[in-house]
Amino acid sequence: MDVAAYRAEAEAFSALLARSSQRFYSGREAALDLAPLYARYARLFDRKAVDALRARAAASGEDADQRLLAFAVDGHTARETAATETELARREGAATLRVDGADVPYTGAAAAQAAAADPARRARIEAARLELLVSELNPLHRERLELTHAVSRALGWPSHRARCEALTGVDLAGLGGEANTLLRLTRPRLEEITGAALAHAAGVSRDRVRRCDLPRLRRAPALDALFPPERLLGALAATLAGLRLDDGARPAIMLDADARPGKSARAFCAGVGVPGEVHLVVAPGGGRDDYAALLHEAGHAHHLAGTDPALGIESRRLGDPAVGEAFGFCFERLVSDPHWLDRRLGLSSAAAAGVAVHARAVRLLDVRRHAAKLGHELALHDAPADLDAIAGEYSRALGEATGVPWPRAPFLADVDPNFYTAAYLRGWALEAQLTTVLHERYGALWFEDPHAGAFLRELWWDGQRHDAETLHARLGAGRLDLTVLAGRPEGGGGFTPARARWR
């Protein structure tokens, strides 16, 4: 195999894939049809390419070769599941829920729940959504799962979990054990930290809070006055200025803040060219959640745009996603930092304390939910024998993790591709150390210190050359361990738009 030619084609494919997504989700294109792109680059993902890269990775033992292999395997799987994925996306996009005499888009159900002050309306949206999920979408989710498992077995792995462990080097089973310990250690404070916030957001007594009320908690309309839409972009610009990240060294970041029909309501980042062309797309809204989403995506954007252009595709595009998530979480954490809230939005200490209480509840629920999801995904992807039993365990585990009754129906839809749930959890653990270092070296106002900006640039220059465990060690810590989050119930951050849905 001509590996140099393969890298060049992989780079071209990745750029076109990112551009297609960027244009669709920014409202510049009416449809997202990736089938022609995969057909054009089919040779990247055929069995011949997978086998050649597998042999090369086995012979060299190099991380770069392992990452190219993972790219080929994931593309091979995407090609094999393309028809099912396309039909699933078509049905989700076309589906509407009839609620209170009006249509609610299926894909906008969580947003509609977040906007609904009436808890009974949120429950009706939930009932309609779950009914459609069971009747129309779950058969396709199951088909996609079975196809993915079949591909992993056909390529020689005993299970999809074994495949993901082999390709990423992450001990998922061990991580699952740490996630269980994290759940046990944080369980005693769950009600203390989340109970009142859940009841207040839902507008019902604590014992009546349900899953359908969680989007309302995340949306936090009561905090809207503290996070006005007209200050959103200015708060980001002032933060970048304080770190001296606005000095022209990041011309590759293209901010799209224009209103446009069809544009994603939440901010997102698209690395079309890494580091040469990175799009930061935002529909300037207001509210704490929109501020958090923009700061998170800005962390991603500056990481990508700050990457050494001389690095190969393996270190610019194909590395450990937990590293990028850590930088996103680091910036996102500022939205609940009292010093940042004072300096950027002029909030009083009392107002900032209220924001912190809300953020602490949301973040603990996020961390615990993903810890429980990891256990569910391990069971689902490790030669499952009884899907009905797995659905029941999913409902029990997620309900225990969040403290609210959890339905069985989303047990197939509420699954991140290739254990991306693990990347979030590892990203949170890495972010905890990164934020600690920033505070220790540059103080509570690190976001106004150009030296802190220079330190971040040094880290970003390596792109994704290092995995989360290696970077964690470089930051002066020992082994990366999820249980560090048990001592920081306020730690962590939110999620990127494409993966933030309460399914």
Image: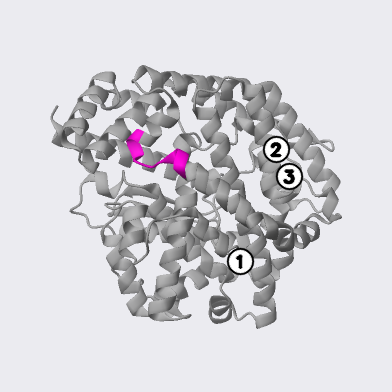
Please report whichever mark, 2 or 3, sits nearer to the chain's N-terminal start. Answer: 3
Q: Secondary structure at mark 3?
A: helix
Is residue 208 one of those drawn in magenta?
A: no
Q: Which residue is mark 2?
A: 396
In the image, the segment drawn in magenta is 166-174
Q: Which residue is mark 3?
A: 211
- Count up the numbered dots: 3
Residue depicted at x 71% and y 43%? 399
* Mark toward the start of the polypeptide (1 vs 2): 1
Query: In front: 336, or 288?
Result: 336
Residue type indicated by callout 1? Pro
Going 46% across and 75% down the picture, which residue do you hit?
Answer: 238
Residue drawn at (64%, 76%) of the image: 352
Quadrant of the image containing the C terminus: top right
Q: Is residue 327 above or below residue 168?
A: below
Residue 137: image x %, image y %?
63, 25
Disc on the earlier residue, 1 or 3: 3
Residue 3 badge: none
Instruction: Please determine whether, in this image, residue 453 is positioned above or below residue 312.
Output: below
Instruction: Count residues near mark 2 (Cα–Cα under 10 Å), then give few for <14, some for 14-19, many for 20+.
Output: some
Q: Nearer the viewer, mark 1 or mark 3?
A: 3
- Asked which quadrant contains residue 247, the reply is bottom left
- Asked if residue 128 is positioned above or below residue 423 in the image, the reply reads above
Q: Give the residue type that dot 3 points to.
A: Arg
Q: Quadrant of residue 239?
A: bottom left
